[in-house]
Amino acid sequence: MITYSLINDDIKGEEFKNFLNYCLEYSTYFSLTFHKYEENKYSECYKMLEKHLIKIVKTYTWYNYKTIENPLTIGIYNSNVYVLNNLLNQFDSLFKNKGNWIEDLCFFCNENLLFGSVTHIKMAQLFLKSELEISNFEKFAQWKKIILTSRDYEYLPSFKLND
């Protein structure tokens, strides 16, 4: 696995729309972290995504998170281009949501992380199988190749849909 970190401050506008579209076409699943899920689960923004929902996961470890007291609530969704407008209704840019307690967009190829983000610290990374793949993502933003430490790997999500 080859890892790249986002260099840009954010991905916005048409680049953000095209980035989402590409990720939705290329990936199998995507995830969102829900804060205050129980309070907001019947809101309009959650309902718009509901038909693509595979499952809700409660976990203490996710991309760049490890919590001790309260588990994170993660929604796992089928990736397809029909979700694009729903996501654009939730996010103005990669790191700016619309005040809906939804953040930390991640994309997966099967059950392997392809892209991870942490909204509140403005962090995003790609996890690619080949260096050739980076050119597909350089259309939307600038990326820098990095080397993960063994500790970094503890913070990479993995999930099984049959769990």
Image (cartoon, rainbow, N blue to C red):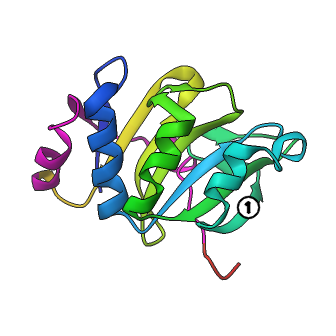
For residue 142, which quarter of the picture?
A: top left
Residue to which mark 1 is pinned: 57
Is residue 93 rendered to the left or right of residue 47? left
In the image, is residue 147 part of the stretch drawn in magenta?
yes
Q: Residue at x 42, y 69 (%)?
A: 28
Is residue 12 rendered to the left or right of residue 58? left
* Residue 126: image location, x then y, percent: 33, 45
For residue 37, which quarter of the picture?
A: top right
Residue 118 drawn above or below residue 56: above
> For the magenta stretch, what is the residue range?
132-159
Q: Residue at x 66, y 56 (%)?
A: 75
**The C terminus lies in quadrant:** bottom right
Residue 89 drawn above or below residue 107: above
Q: Residue at x 59, y 23 (%)?
A: 120
* Residue 102: image location, x then y, percent: 66, 38
Q: Residue at x 32, y 26 (%)?
A: 13
* Residue 119: image location, x then y, percent: 55, 28
Visible in this render: residue 150? no
Amino acid type at mark 1 = Val
Visible in this render: residue 56? yes
Residue 25 drawn above or below residue 85: below
Q: Secondary structure at mark 1?
A: strand
In the image, is residue 111 part of the stretch drawn in magenta?
no
For residue 3, which quarter of the picture?
A: top left
Is residue 102 rendered to the left or right of residue 148? right
Is residue 131 rendered to the left or right of residue 69? left
* Residue 55: image location, x then y, percent: 69, 68
Circle 1: is it few (<14), some (14-19), or many (20+) Cα within 10 Å? some
